[in-house]
Image (cartoon, grey):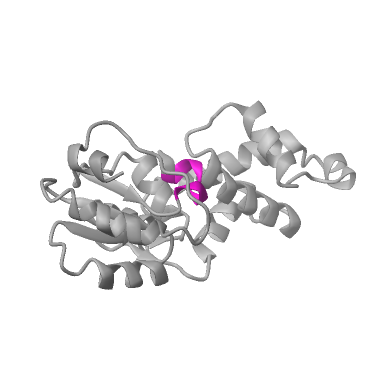
Amino acid sequence: IFVWFASGIGNLVVRARAGTGKTTTIIEACKHAAHEGKILLAAFNKRIAIELSSRVAGLLNVEVKTLHSLGYRFILRYWTNAKVDKTGQVDRDRAVAVCGKNAPDDIVVMVQKLAGMLKNIAPLTYEINDVIDIARRFDCVPDEAWEEEGWTLEKVCRLAGRARDAAMDRDPAGRISFDDMIYIPLANNFTQRWFTMVVVDEAQDMNAAQLL
């Protein structure tokens, strides 16, 4: 591991069990990459990021961030008034907008849930059959009563795709959701190469959007 960090050529995946010193190894390994211009140490959540920051304080070329905070940083370069809506109302508003104000609340909730799933696991997927498979996997399927009212599975899936894509347009009030912090930079090509090396702690927990 340390030899790889010293060379920095290609990619490295380390498989390790719990309690084997993964974090300690990462921090020591970063010391072997002093030649790198700037290293991103991606943490799974804010609590872990704070802990890691204290442990790499002496490594001037290492910056600890969650991927969500990095995504938010990308967004602010283009949308200076962007602010995180912790209530989730912005996602609700997008679902209502695509479904129509007279849509049943159960359908709106289903569309909102599926749109969130698409942002995370299929951010760039537009094939309707792929979206239908995801809807079935996460139980976002209208029952027979809604089907009879015209709210078919295919219709719900198409609306969810539109609700997901609506996040690509700047909200008038600057609101973005938690999922948008990853999705918007990816969908709008807001990402930039700020780091010469990226190190991910707990990489197995990343979803498709984070990996992209």
Residue 26 spot, x, y in % from top left? 32, 55
Q: Height in image: 15 above or below 104?
A: above
Residue ID at (57%, 60%): 92
Residue 169 spot, x, y in % from top left? 39, 47
Q: Quadrant of residue 28?
A: bottom left
Residue ID at (33%, 56%): 25
Q: Quadrant of residue 57?
A: bottom left
Q: Height in image: 58 above or below 72?
A: below
How many callouts does the rendering have?
Answer: 0
Q: Is 80 contained in the magenta span?
A: no
Residue 165 versus residue 129: which sits nearer the camera?
A: 129
The part of the chain drawn in magenta is: 203-210
Residue 173 versus residue 65: which sits nearer the camera?
A: 65
The C terminus - image quarter: top left
Q: Height in image: 208 above or below 73?
A: above
Residue ID at (67%, 54%): 108
What predominant SS class does the magenta segment belong to? helix
Residue 65 spot, x, y in % from top left? 31, 60
Q: Height in image: 65 above or below 16?
A: below
Residue ID at (71%, 33%): 154
Residue 85 spot, x, y in % from top left? 44, 67
Residue 88 versus residue 186: which sits nearer the camera?
A: 186
Q: Is residue 91 visible?
A: yes
Residue 171 versus residue 201: which sits nearer the camera?
A: 201
Q: Relative to residue 172, is residue 77 drawn left or right?
A: left
Q: Relative to residue 107, is residue 189 drawn left or right?
A: left
Q: Relative to residue 156, is residue 142 drawn left or right?
A: right
The N terminus - image quarter: top left
